[in-house]
Image (cartoon, rainbow, N blue to C red):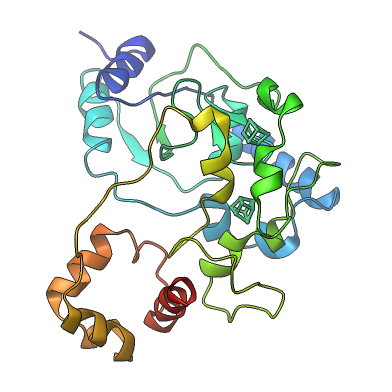
């Protein structure tokens, strides 16, 4: 069977992935959207000029991409992963809606999923580009706003103050500013407070328990090493499994994050 949109999306769905397609010409619309947000003061220039911030973390999708590749090959089409502002694309394509916390939510999945984008030379017939939408459920809910330690969710505007979000601080190698409270930390990377409080996530569970991921000796080395190269291979593998190396943070930043949640 020739690859087509329906076959591709069905194959992805059969493997636990939801997808939407948009025409490549909307890359220009995406750029215009970012510029508009920048002009409105919602997206600071430091974020606009930082592709790694906009494209988010590049997780390991080695299990997902072959599914799309296999399907597209049937029609002699190809695909390539692209780094792109995932969240805006997900909302503009109708795959997701924004929550008040600016996390994106997919119907039936809540916010516990990961986004990946790829470009393909397969012609797109159904173009899903649409206006940005906030989840209707947010209009009568303030759970995330009330749970946010940094108070960066603003009830008077649709975009959070990203420069105050805890995630912004602990996914950066820069020292925490004095404004970051010592009791705000809750994750080694990122912050889960608003997602855990969200009623739309009540059926999902983001917690995967790994018993004693590090030996006492490994923990001691983790705190005293100057660089990843000084750590044993087993420790590096565990750090990767825990996604703690995904952001290419230097070891001192990871040590800082460990200490912040242990105090
Ligand atoms: S991730 Fe944390 S700091 Fe950022 S908006 Fe959510 S609760 Fe607030
Ligand atoms: S906690 Fe409530 S307001 Fe916040 S994203 Fe979830 S539904 Fe929307």
Q: Is residue 214 above or below residue 156?
A: below
- In the image, 47 versus 97, the foreground residue is 97
Q: Is residue 151 left or right of residue 260?
A: right
Quadrant that contains the N terminus: top left
Q: Is residue 134 left or right of residue 253?
A: right
Q: Is residue 44 above or below residue 139?
A: below
Q: Is residue 30 above or below residue 121?
A: below
- In the image, 247 versus 242, the foreground residue is 242
Q: Position of residue 32 (x, y in %)?
A: 73, 40
- In the image, 256 versus 120, the foreground residue is 256
Q: Is residue 25 something that shows in the picture?
A: no
Q: Position of residue 41 (x, y in %)?
A: 83, 53
**Residue positioned 59% across, 45% down in the render:** 194
Q: Position of residue 183 (x, y in %)?
A: 59, 69
Q: Is residue 223 above or below residue 97?
A: below
**Residue positioned 58% across, 82% down in the render:** 175
Q: How many marks?
A: 0
Q: Position of residue 244 (x, y in %)?
A: 35, 64
């Amino acid at each position: 069977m020739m690859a087509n949109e329906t076959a591709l999306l069905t194959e992805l769905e059969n493997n636990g992935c939801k997808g939407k397609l948009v025409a490549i010409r909307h890359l220009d619309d995406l750029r215009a959207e970012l510029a508009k947000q920048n002009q409105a003061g919602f997206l600071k220039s430091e974020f606009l000029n930082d592709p790694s911030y906009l494209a988010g973390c590049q997780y390991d999708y080695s299990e997902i991409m072959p599914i799309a590749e296999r399907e597209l090959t049937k029609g002699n089409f190809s695909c390539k992963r692209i780094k792109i502002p995932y969240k805006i694309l997900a909302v503009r394509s109708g795959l997701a809606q924004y929550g008040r916390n600016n996390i994106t939510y997919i119907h039936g999945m809540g916010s516990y999923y990961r986004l990946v984008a790829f470009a393909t030379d397969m012609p797109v017939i159904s173009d899903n580009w649409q206006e940005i939408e906030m989840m209707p459920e947010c209009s009568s809910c303030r759970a995330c706003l009330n749970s946010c330690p940094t108070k960066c969710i603003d009830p008077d505007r649709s975009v959070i103050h990203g420069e105050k979000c805890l995630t912004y601080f602990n996914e950066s190698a820069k020292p925490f500013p004095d404004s970051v409270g010592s009791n705000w930390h809750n994750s080694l990377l990122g912050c889960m407070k608003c997602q855990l409080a969200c009623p739309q996530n009540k059926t999902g569970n983001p917690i995967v328990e790994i018993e004693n991921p590090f030996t006492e000796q490994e923990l001691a080395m983790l705190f005293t090493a100057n660089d990843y190269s000084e750590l044993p291979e087993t420790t590096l593998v565990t750090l990767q499994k825990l996604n703690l190396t995904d952001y290419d943070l230097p070891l001192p930043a990871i040590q800082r994050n460990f200490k912040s949640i242990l105090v």
